[in-house]
Image: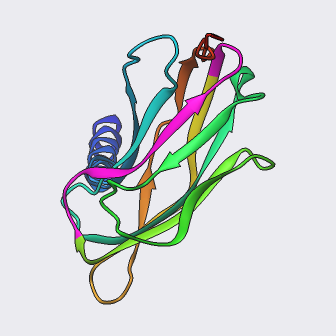
Amino acid sequence: MFKIFLSYFVVAISFLSLTCVPQVLFATEVYFQVIPHTGSSTPTLVEVRIDPQSKKLNVVEGVLKFSGDALADSVIEVENGQSILPIWPTPPEYDNNKKSISFTGGIPNGFDSPGLLFKLRISASRSGDMSISYTDGNAYLNDGKGTKEAIDSEPLTVHVDKVLEPKTKNI
C-alpha cells in the first residue's frame, strides 16, 4: 500500500513540476540595471530593461513604484529616447505625489529580443537607499489578438548618493 501511495505521489510531483516550471522559466521579465557612477557630482542612472524570452511583444505597460529614505527631496527624470518602444500613448513620467511612474509603450510589428524601455536619472539631496519595483504590468503579444502576457520582475534596492552642487566662482 505504501509503495502505491509513494508512486502516485512521485507521479503527481513530477507532473506539477513539468507543468509549472516552463511558465516560470520562460516568462517575460522586466529588470533593472544600475549604471556605475562616474563621480560624486553625477546622478544615479538606472536602466529599466525588458527580456521577452523570444516571444514577440508589441505593447508593454506598467507602473514603477518608489520607496525609501533617499526618495525625500529626490528628482527623478525619465529618458526614453533610446527605447526599444518608439510609440508612447502614456509616456513614462515621474509623479511626485504618487511616487510612481505609469507608462504604456508599443512598437509596430513587435520585438522579440531584450532591450531598453527607458532610463531613470536619480538626483538626491541626501544619501540613502531607494527601492524600485515594477507592479501592475502586462505585455501584449504581437499575435493579432492582443494576447496578454504576464511579466515577472524583482524589485531593486539601490544606494543613491547625494549629488553635490557644482561649485561656481565669482570673478
Residue 126 belongs to the span the image colors magenta: yes
Residue 27 belongs to the span the image colors magenta: no
- Comparing 56 with 5, the one in front is 56
Q: Residue furthest bottom?
A: 144
Give x and y (percent) for residue 71.
71, 29
**Viewport quadrant of the N terminus:** top left
Give x and y (percent) for residue 32.
42, 37
Q: Give the magenta part as a residue range.
A: 111-129
Judged left or right of residue 130, residue 50 is left
**Viewport quadrant of the C terminus:** top right
Judged left or right of residue 158, residue 97 is right
Q: Mark yes or no: residue 140 visible.
A: no
Residue at position x 66%, y 35% in the image: 75
Q: Mark yes or no: residue 71 visible.
A: yes
Give x and y (percent) for residue 18.
25, 51
Q: Would you place residue 106 above or below residue 125 in this image?
A: below
Q: Magenta-highlighted stretch: main secondary structure?
A: strand
Coloration of the structure image: rainbow
Q: Would you place residue 51 above or below residue 37 in this image?
A: below
Residue at position x 43%, y 12% in the image: 39
Judged left or right of residue 23, residue 157 is right
Give x and y (percent) for residue 104.
51, 68
Residue at position x 74%, y 21% in the image: 69
Residue at position x 71%, y 20% in the image: 125
- Comparing 83 with 14, the one in front is 83
